Image (cartoon, rainbow, N blue to C red):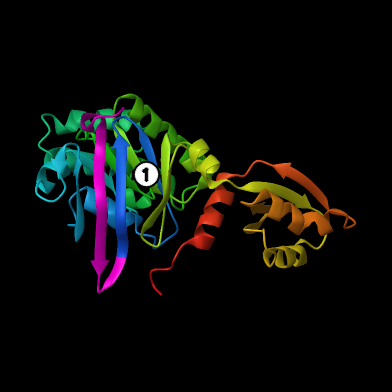
């Protein structure tokens, strides 16, 4: 059993309201030290607001907890000194070079030798040869690598990465995640918000939030198992029409296109089988029982979530 000392983050019932609307409702999370925790959900789901409460940038209206052993309400300054926070937007100085940005961060944190610290980070992240390039001239992938270098330079115990690879090409995303895993191997905890399914599967644990509420959490395998979906993959002609027909049937909880096929899922196996039985003999259609994917689970969860704008 985990103890409080094993957890980098331990919060209960976090709630935040803006203008009378609840954007985060009763979120409880435990994130073990040295783990990569994926925080998933659609845009506007409350991920960024939750992250800002965890690191002391926002005070929750309700709830309590600790981050790195410090109270998120009363010891925010102690948390901020030990956390590296990477925002969605590139937040370094566009008109400074790679080297100048890193040296500035090192001086800001009063590191003993800012020049050497910046040089070591440049080498670690493969930025050699780009030291004097202006940050504003970097591609999206190189900007994200520089931003990661800046937030890890002071040696934080926890990284809070808010959709760090949005708009970055697949190769750069893979390299970025390789570095996150290398940091985790050194004992650094990372909480990463994303809506890429392949990134979710790179995490040790995940949580899914929609409309401000936590819908599920666990390892990828646990989340899929807990959903209890029975899934069929169906391929053939006229799938758009088939999707519209199936979505109306009792026993079918989720229908979604995946490439040249549909994923058809339900929680009640008997009801699902009864619903699709008339379609099994339809000419040209091929039905194959398959394992539900993480995306199947999240699409299904979204269909049952309550919109907090309503």
Left or right of 200? Residue 246 is right
Please state, as top left, top right, bottom left or bottom right, where the N terminus lies in the image.
top left
Judge whether residue 130 can be spotted in this image: yes
Q: In the image as oriented, which residue stretches furthest toward the front?
A: 270
Front one among 108 and 231: 231
Q: Which percent across, then down, holds residue 15?
A: 26, 59
* Residues packed near mark 1 inside 10 Å, few (<14), some (14 to 19) or many (20 plus): many
Task: Let me know if residue 7 is in the magenta part.
Answer: yes
Quadrant where the image shows the C terminus: bottom left
Q: Looking at the image, which residue is at 33% across and 29% down?
A: 183
Q: Quadrant of residue 7?
A: top left
Magenta span: predominant SS is: strand
- Give the residue at x 33% y 42%: 191
Residue 218 drawn in magenta: no
Image point 35% across, 38% down: which residue?
130
In front: 304, or 126? Answer: 304
**Residue that sits furthest to the right in the current view:** 283
Residue span colored magenta: 1-22
Q: Position of residue 107 (x, y in %)?
A: 12, 39
Q: Residue at x 12, y 33 (%)?
A: 111
Q: Which residue is mark 1?
A: 192
Q: Return the x and y of residue 46 as percentages of the image width and height.
A: 34, 59
- Of residues 9 and 13, which is closer to you in this image? 13
């Amino acid at each position: 059993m985990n103890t409080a000392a094993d957890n980098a983050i331990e919060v209960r019932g976090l709630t935040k309201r803006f203008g009378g609307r609840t954007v985060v409702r009763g979120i409880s999370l435990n994130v073990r030290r040295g783990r990569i925790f994926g925080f998933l959900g659609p845009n506007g789901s409350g991920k960024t607001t939750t992250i800002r409460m965890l690191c002391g940038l926002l005070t929750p209206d309700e709830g309590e907890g600790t981050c790195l052993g410090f109270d998120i309400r009363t010891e925010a300054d102690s948390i901020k000194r030990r956390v590296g926070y990477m925002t969605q937007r590139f937040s370094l100085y566009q008109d400074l070079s790679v080297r100048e940005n890193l040296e500035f961060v090192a001086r800001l944190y009063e590191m003993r030798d800012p020049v050497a610290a910046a040089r070591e980070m440049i080498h670690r992240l493969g930025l050699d040869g780009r030291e004097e390039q202006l940050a504003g001239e970097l591609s999206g992938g190189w900007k994200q690598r520089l931003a990661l270098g800046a937030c890890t330079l002071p040696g934080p115990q926890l990284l809070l990465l808010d959709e760090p690879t949005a708009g970055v090409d697949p190769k750069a995303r893979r390299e970025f995640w390789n570095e996150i895993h290398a940091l985790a191997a050194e004992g650094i905890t990372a909480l990463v918000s994303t809506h890429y399914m392949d990134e979710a599967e790179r995490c040790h644990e995940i949580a899914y939030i929609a409309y401000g509420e936590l819908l599920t959490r666990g390892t990828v395998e646990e989340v899929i198992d807990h959903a209890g979906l029975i899934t069929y993959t169906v391929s053939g002609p006229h799938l758009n029409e088939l999707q519209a027909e199936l979505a109306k049937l009792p026993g079918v909880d989720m229908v979604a296109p995946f490439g040249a096929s549909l994923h058809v899922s339900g929680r009640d196996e008997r009801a699902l089988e009864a619903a699709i039985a008339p379609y099994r003999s339809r000419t040209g259609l091929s039905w194959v029982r398959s394992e539900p994917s993480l995306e199947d689970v999240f699409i299904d969860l979204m269909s049952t979530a309550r919109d907090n704008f309503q």
